[in-house]
Image (cartoon, helix red, strand yellow):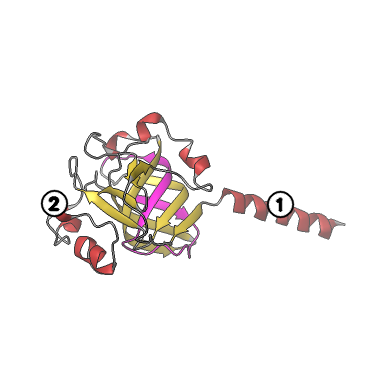
């Protein structure tokens, strides 16, 4: 009986730990060239919806042509930040991402995720667990509470991460104020007026983000 009770406790504990773990959702389906190009509101996936609904109205738009957005002013706020993954570190059962923020004004292409090439700087993301399959130079949208500490990059403790692979996102323009790292910007070899491509291939990302 004691052994059975112990097994039940372990199973319950494992279930609670699994429920509390962040979810990483991968977007891998590339758009086809059928139909025309259009604009639409961003639509969260079913798995993403519970986290998207936790965003305050001031967090629906995170930079771009019409919205000035500063990561440094979001301490203690539940956020949903887009960004390009610049570094992935796995150690001691945890994953740390270094992410270059990209602005988003709430609107995207109807056939592919399209967002701003400019952003508000780098931030880090703490994701419990390892082996999530998040590749460097892919795109993420990270949901969680932000922490801003003087002298350090803003940090998000991830509750949910949506991850777009190459071919599933594009950059619409370079609008708004650029507060991002010049180290990453120097890797771009394309004129900012020609930053967009509705059907990007690997070469598209290499010329804008650098090579893997």
Q: Residue farthest to the front? A: 35
- Residue 37 seen from this side: yes
SS state under label 2: helix
Quadrant of the image occupied by residue 205: bottom left
Q: Relative to the observer, which residue lies in front, 125 or 27?
A: 27
Tell me the number on the disc at residue 12.
1
Taking the spot 40% from the left edge, 34% from the top edge, the residue there is 77
| Residue located 34% across and 48% down the image | 82
Return the x and y of residue 89 as percentages of the image width and height: 38, 62
Q: Is residue 121 left or right of residue 89?
A: left
Foreground residue among 155 and 195: 195
Magenta highlight on residue 199: no
Give the residues drawn in magenta, as a range: 123-150
Q: Nearer the viewer, residue 127 or 185?
A: 185
Q: At which x and y percent is residue 24? A: 48, 55
In the picture as drawn, the residue positioned furthest to the right comes out as 1
Sequence-first tag of 2 and 1: 1
Quadrant of the snapshot with the N terminus: bottom right
> Farthest left residue?
191
Element class at badge 1: helix
In the shown orientation, is residue 81 left or right of residue 49? left
Viewer-side residue, 160 vs 206: 206
Q: Give the residue pinned by disc 2.
A: 193
Q: Residue at x 36, y 55 (%)?
A: 35
Answer yes or no: is residue 123 visible: no
- Where is residue 13 drawn, in percent x and y? 67, 52
- Identified at 45% across, 65% down, the residue is 133
Above/below status of 126 relative to 69: below
**What is the crowding at mark 2: few (fewer than 14 residues within 10 Å), some, or many (at least 20)?**
few
Query: What number is the disc on residue 172?
Result: none
- Tag nearer the camera, 2 or 1: 2
């Amino acid at each position: 009986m004691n052994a059975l009770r112990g097994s039940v406790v372990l199973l319950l504990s494992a279930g609670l730990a699994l429920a509390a773990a962040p979810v990483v959702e991968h977007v891998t389906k590339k758009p086809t060239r059928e139909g025309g190009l259009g604009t639409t509101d961003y639509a969260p996936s079913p798995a993403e919806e519970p986290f998207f609904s936790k965003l305050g109205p001031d967090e629906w738009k995170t930079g771009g042509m019409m919205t000035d957005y500063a990561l440094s002013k979001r301490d203690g706020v539940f956020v949903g930040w887009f960004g390009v993954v610049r570094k992935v570190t796995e150690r001691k059962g945890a994953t740390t991402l270094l992410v270059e923020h990209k602005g988003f004004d709430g609107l995207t292409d109807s056939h592919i995720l399209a967002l701003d090439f400019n952003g508000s700087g780098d931030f880090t993301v703490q994701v419990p667990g390892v082996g999530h399959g998040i590749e460097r130079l892919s795109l993420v949208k990270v949901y969680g509470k932000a922490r801003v500490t003087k002298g350090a990059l803003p940090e998000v403790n991830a509750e949910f991460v949506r991850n777009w692979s190459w071919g599933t996102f594009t950059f619409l323009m370079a609008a708004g104020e650029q507060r991002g790292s010049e180290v990453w910007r120097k890797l771009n070899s394309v004129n900012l007026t020609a930053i967009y491509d509705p059907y990007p291939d690997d070469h598209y990302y290499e010329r804008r983000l650098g090579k893997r």
